[in-house]
Image (cartoon, rainbow, N blue to C red):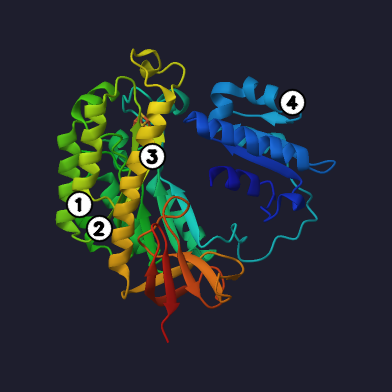
């Protein structure tokens, strides 16, 4: 968003297809090896398919820590910038032609029904596997006035969902000495954009979901009963080695949010194969997942990040053991997800349509693809809805069938 604003001030506008752009700009992730590889693959693909005269810039976390690696992998890249160098990027691009006709009433944003609102950046937590604090520095909260202005812009462009993201969203305001900062921000956002029906909170930190925050979530009509809280493991000894909060803090936060919002949808993520993880510790993780019945579970196999304490810890877990554990965890998570989806059959839900065009189902019917409030964009499941509806529609529907992660739905008359 900040980069988009900086570029817009030079009269540049986003386009839907890479082929239409004068500048191809890739914002990279350097968090884990899989994300690094994916970033480089995207850059390579764009480099290979770009037409004469198109510029290719690569920016963000990966280039902050490994700009040379990107340059070596794709030597044709025109410019490389590190994290948050928005103004420098805009200055390098320069201003667009003044003959460009900017429409009245503000420019449409990329037109997606969902928009990400980054509420803070950086992180002060000590997780031993994580390179983010080195890349991003200390946590700094966005000014609430600025965030509300961004939310209003998204709402004016037709967004139906705001997804609040940060490295640690529950730390919002702590750098200003306000431990209730996130609850207050949710209240301000809810009031500022009542026309946005879904405000969603991602990346809470265990132990920092306060009763004040949970009550705010429960009481605000357009904050969805959904919380993403990466917990990383279910064994206390593992959490200690990761320098994460004790398991009791995870239990405490789950309890706080379930007490305030009994039907809250909980998403979490875990690392499997962190150095020293024994079979018993992994079994503790499985027991934890089974006991808590998380609605959505994401998992990563551990990948060492240079300059982090965990990278040099003894007892690194062999790849094949990690893969096996990853498979066992995801099999369990999938069966829980399937049960939860089966329990949805017969219920009425609102579906936010995301697909631009309908597609044909196996039975030859036209369907559009969207999500219910129970699923966050890009990481959770989908809802397949019979009929043809434009992207951004909210359609009342009944759940007819359940797949392990996705729902099959029919519109209600
Ligand atoms: S809280 Fe998240 S971003 Fe911060 S150090 Fe831990 S894993 Fe990294």
Label 1 environment density (alpha carbons within 10 Å; few <14, some 14–19, many ≥20): many
Of callouts 3 and 1, which one flags the residue occurring earlier in the amino acid sequence? Answer: 1
Label 3 environment density (alpha carbons within 10 Å; few <14, some 14–19, many ≥20): some
Between 37 and 128, which is closer to the camera in this rendering? Answer: 37
Would you say 150 lies left or right of 71 here? left
Location of residue 67 by image quarter: top right
The residue at 40%/18% (across/down) is: 308
Q: CA distance from mark 2 to mark 3?
A: 26 Å
The residue at 77%/56% (across/down) is: 100
The residue to which callout 1 is attached is 257
Q: CA distance from mark 4 to mark 3?
A: 37 Å
Residue 254, percent from left and from top: 19, 47
Question: Label for residue 264?
Answer: 2
Q: CA distance from mark 3 to mark 1?
A: 29 Å
Q: What element does badge 4 sit on?
A: loop
Q: CA distance from mark 4 to mark 2?
A: 48 Å
**Quarter, ligand 1:** top left
Q: Are marks 3 and 1 in contact (CB under 8 Å)?
A: no
Of callouts 4 and 2, which one flags the residue occurring earlier in the amino acid sequence? Answer: 4
Q: Mark 3 vs mark 1: give the one in front.
A: 3
Question: Label for residue 75?
Answer: 4
Q: Are marks 4 and 2 in contact (CB under 8 Å)?
A: no
* 272, above or below 370, in the image: above
Of callouts 2 and 3, which one flags the residue occurring earlier in the amino acid sequence? Answer: 2
Q: What element does badge 2 sit on?
A: loop
Question: Label for residue 327?
Answer: 3
The residue at 30%/19% (across/down) is: 276
Q: Are marks 1 and 2 in contact (CB under 8 Å)?
A: yes
Residue 80, percent from left and from top: 66, 28
């Amino acid at each position: 968003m900040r980069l988009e604003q900086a570029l817009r001030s030079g009269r540049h506008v986003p386009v839907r297809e890479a082929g239409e752009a004068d500048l191809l700009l890739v914002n990279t992730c350097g968090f884990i090896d899989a994300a690094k590889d994916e970033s480089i693959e995207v850059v390579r693909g764009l480099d290979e398919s770009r037409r004469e005269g198109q510029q290719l810039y690569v920016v963000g976390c990966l280039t902050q820590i490994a700009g040379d690696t990107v340059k070596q992998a794709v030597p044709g890249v025109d410019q490389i910038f590190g994290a948050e160098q928005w103004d420098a990027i805009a200055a390098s691009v320069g201003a667009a032609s003044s003959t460009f006709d900017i429409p009245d009433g503000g420019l449409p944003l990329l037109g997606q029904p969902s928009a990400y609102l980054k509420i803070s950046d950086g992180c002060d937590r000590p997780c031993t596997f994580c390179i983010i604090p080195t890349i991003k520095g200390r946590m700094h909260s966005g000014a609430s006035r600025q965030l509300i202005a961004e939310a209003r812009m998204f709402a004016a462009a037709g967004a139906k969902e705001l997804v609040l993201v940060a490295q640690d969203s529950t730390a919002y305001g702590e750098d200003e000495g306000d431990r209730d900062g996130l609850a207050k921000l949710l209240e301000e956002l809810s009031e500022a954009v009542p026309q946005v029906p879904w405000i969603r909170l991602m990346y809470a930190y265990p132990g920092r979901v306060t009763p004040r925050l949970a009550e705010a979530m429960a009481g605000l009509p357009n904050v969805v009963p959904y919380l993403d809280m990466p917990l990383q493991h279910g064994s206390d000894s593992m959490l200690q080695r990761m320098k994460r909060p004790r398991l009791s803090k995870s239990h405490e936060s789950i309890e706080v949010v379930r007490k305030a919002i009994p039907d809250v949808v909980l998403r979490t993520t875990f690392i499997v194969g962190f150095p020293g993880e024994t079979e018993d510790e992994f079994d503790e993780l499985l027991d934890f997942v089974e006991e808590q019945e998380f609605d959505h579970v994401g998992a990563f196999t551990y990948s060492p990040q240079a300059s982090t304490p965990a990278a040099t810890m003894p007892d690194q877990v062999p790849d094949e053991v990690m893969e096996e554990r990853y498979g066992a965890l995801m099999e369990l998570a999938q069966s829980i997800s399937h049960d939860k989806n089966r329990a949805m059959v017969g219920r009425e839900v609102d579906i936010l349509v995301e697909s631009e065009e309908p597609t044909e189902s196996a039975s030859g019917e036209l369907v559009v693809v969207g999500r219910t409030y129970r699923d966050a964009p890009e990481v959770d499941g989908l809802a397949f809805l019979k009929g043809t509806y434009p992207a951004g529609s909210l359609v009342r529907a009944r759940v007819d069938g359940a797949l392990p992660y996705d729902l099959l739905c029919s519109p209600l008359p």
